[in-house]
Amino acid sequence: MRLQSIRVRLTAWYCVVLATVLVAAGALSYGVMKRQLRRDADRALAATSRQIAATLRDEVEEQHGLLPQRAADEVLNEFRDKEHPIFLWSAAATPPMSIKSSTHVRFNVTPLRLGNADYVLAAGQSLTAQEETLAELRRAMLLTIPLALLIAAGGGYLLARKSLEPVEEAFASQRRFMAEASHELRTPVAILQGELEVTLSREDRDARDYRESLQIMEKSVRRLTRIVRDLFLLARGDAGQSPLRDERFYLDEVAAQTVRGLRTLAADCGVTVREEHESDLAVRGDEDLVQRMIANLVENAIKHARAEVSVRCLARDRERRIEVRDDGRGVAPELRDKIFERFVHAGGAGAGLGLPIARWIAEAHGGTLRLESSGADGSLFVVTLPVAAR
């Protein structure tokens, strides 16, 4: 609901800004158009006045300094029509009332000296055509501006929704992460609290009982420590605060050392771990993190294996390939796309952070981690890493 409100507010602000811009641009365009039409009319009227004045002067010269009424009317009628009213009167006379009262005609008024008399010439042009043009422009703006705002509102809402989808997903993921992290941390803490309460509630317990309680608490502390460490690593990775060391090392040696360290865990689970590798598989990156990645994959395989886990390190083209295979029951189809998400359990114990951390480490080194195959005969996880520069 909160993100929905954010989307609506963003769309509203976008529409307000766009409406302001469109109205301002429309008003400016309308003003420019009106001013240009007036300038064109004034230039045409000035040209007409000059032509009429020149013709009247020629008529006065032909009449030896006089301007008969009939001759003046003939000259004016040549330029006069219903769209262009033209008046000529003596400077001492009162101007025609039509000039003062007309609101839809624009006049150019010019004083003239014709022979021995002074006159005033008023050449007019009807503004009806200009007003119709401006009215059409207003109607077009009244139609296009709301339509543009409607389209922009729809597009802006969709854009805001699309832009905020990652934020929505991030909020949902963060809430889910916090809830599941709290659940995972609550379990070992509850075990510790329960064992402490039981241990302290009885005074007649022998050393063996105390030792069993301490072993349970020690196991819970290890689990709690691992969860906190994993959460801290993921949090630093998400925040971009986990810089990788850039060093050259050999993947085959790291894999062999990691498998040796996990054989005791495998034996406790009744699982045999086999490891084979090609030699001199040089890579560059953070050796500790790569070892952590391999350990997470092997531990995950041990938890789900029936009897055997195999680890292979190979060179393929310009890549290094790590294959971790188990002979378990495989990953359920509905979980195959989710096992790399945090706190997703594909059966067995654990906090569900091993595979997400392993994938993050692989991708941080420019590589990939994927579940290549899974079925009734087991699962195969494959890591690819780039080759180290010579």
Image: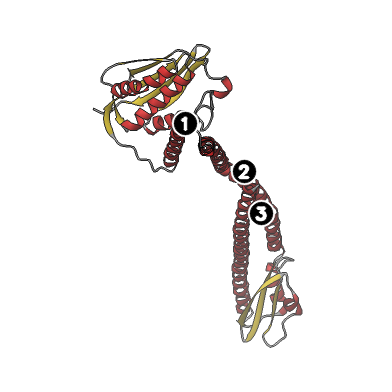
Q: Please tell me which residue is depicted at 48% across the width and 30% down the height of the picture.
A: 209
Q: Mark 3 is on which residue type?
A: Ile
* Residue contact between numbered discs 3 and 1, judged by CB atoms under 8 Å: no
> Which residue does the numbered mark 3 point to in the structure image?
145
Q: How is the image coloured?
A: secondary structure
As measured in the structure, the alpha-carbon distance from the residue carrying label 2 to the one carrying label 3 is 20 Å
- Front-lying residue, 110 or 318: 318
What percent of the width, then of the height, locates residue 49? 62, 72
Quarter of the view holding residue 358: top left
145 sits left or right of 231 in the view:
right
Q: Which of pointers 1 and 2 lies earlier in the amino acid sequence?
A: 2
- Taking the view exactly as shown, the residue that stands out farthest to the left is 390
- Taking the view exactly as shown, the residue that stands out farthest to the front is 204
Q: Secondary structure at mark 2?
A: helix
Front: mark 2 or 3: 2
As measured in the structure, the alpha-carbon distance from the residue carrying label 1 to the one carrying label 2 is 70 Å
Q: Residues within 10 Å of mark 2 (few under 14, many from 20)?
A: some
What percent of the width, then of the height, locates residue 141? 67, 56
> Which residue does the numbered mark 2 point to in the structure image?
158
- Front-lying residue, 370 or 146: 370
Quarter of the view holding residue 62: bottom right
